[in-house]
Image (tube, rainbow, N blue to C red):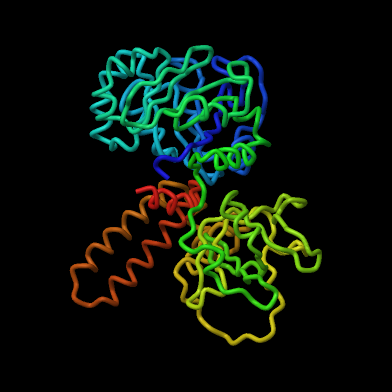
Amino acid sequence: MSNAKRFIGAIYLKDLKVVDSIPGNNVISEDPVSFACALSNSNVDEIMVFDLSPSGDDKAHEAALDMIKDICKAVDVNVTGAGNVKRMEDIKKLLYAGCKRACLNYKDAKNADILQEVSKKFGKDKIVICYDDGKVLEDNKEQIEKYASEAVFFARGKEISAIAAEIPLTVLLDKNDYDKLPDNVFYENEFVSGVTGNIIYENLSAIDECKKNCLEKGLKICALEPAFTWEQLKKNSDGMVPVIVQDYRTDQVLMLAYMNEEAYNKTLQTGKMTYFSRSRNQLWLKGETSSHFQFVKELTADCDLDTILARVKQVGAACHTGSYSCFFNEIAKKDYSEKNPQKVLDSVFEVIKDRKVNPREGSYTNYLYSKGLDKILKKVGEEATEMVIAAKNPNSNEIVYEMSDFLYHMMVLMAEKNVSWEDITDELSRR
């Protein structure tokens, strides 16, 4: 997808609200997280968040970073953070908040000076530069290509001119700058690889149409590229392929549905699970009426190429009854110990969190909560030391016991500081 044209949603964040432009006086959303989810769910390829808090107002900047963290956690596309970046620490904070990349305003001479430093510290792939003067890229082409992964041109009334750069070029356009759909930017400027700005928000309902137009004109877009064509899959007697749908985070099986060729191709094009309803005899976009969309994470065919396993992000409930999964009618069950590490950790953590809300007399967990953070931290430190000592002993049983103790106390600390397993695993996956 390296040469694909990208539709990049923009969020101008000011006073923890979404405004319509930079500097922005008109509020268009009081809820930046919901706004970001609307962008993500409308098939944008990425999101850029611009922190417009006043320069020097550290409190407003920290609040904006917390909001950016919430946005990164809520959406299913990569987020690039921009605005209020003046030093290496600001890059680090954006990346720690969950941004895939951080953007340096290259117009600022100080930022131009630290480009090499932050690129070497965090990696070229984490650094984007933005500019509003065409000469910037032209005059600093060699350094920018060496230390940045992308350049963002704040066009906004300026001519978009071609500069032979070896990194992707995204243009930021507001609605009043370009009286056409975003895909027209690509037709008229072949060298442009991405479009962002409120031109995307203003045309949000047309993103799928824009991507379709790009494909029809021979332009590559960010779409799923199948290893198997529909012709290569084996169909059932109705000419369809059954699809088993699974939650990509928990591996829970959600439902079973069917695809015909149109549904298969539509799913690949839009990234949203689309099926063929046999009862209604028509194409069925999951969530079209309920808003309980399923966003594709992975499609895998079985050994015979006659069944598809779809791993998805499920919004809302998968079942028409309101149940998260269609599989809830238990037929028979043996007693067994759960062996899935994720389920065990989740189960224990849920009990620990519940003790915080619903204290139980005699509970050691509630004892720790009652003594406060310092006591919890002391126990975490003690258990860490005991784990180190156990690791020096030849008997593996002791280290397992001490690691379990440490994990328990760590989860109490997580609950006390409102950190979830998802926070931890998301951070690990970014690494």
Residue at figure coordinates x 41%, y 51% from the top left: 375
Q: Position of residue 198 (x, y in %)?
A: 59, 25
> Could you tell whether 187 is left or right of 267 in the image?
left
Q: Quadrant of the N terminus?
A: top left
> Could you tell whether 417 is left or right of 14 in the image?
left
| Image-quadrant location for residue 17 | top right
> Could you tell whether 153 is left or right of 177 in the image?
left
Residue at figure coordinates x 28%, y 74% from the top left: 398
Q: Nearer the viewer, residue 314 or 284?
A: 284
Number of numbered markers? 0
Q: Nearer the viewer, residue 52 or 310?
A: 310
Q: Position of residue 188 (x, y in %)?
A: 51, 25
Q: Among all residues in the image, which is located at the extreme right?
A: 280
Q: Nearer the viewer, residue 263 or 42?
A: 263
Residue at figure coordinates x 56%, y 44% from the top left: 74
Q: Position of residue 71 (x, y in %)?
A: 54, 38
Residue 217 in the image: above or below residue 321: above
Residue 332 in the image: above or below residue 318: below
Q: Position of residue 112 (x, y in %)?
A: 29, 18
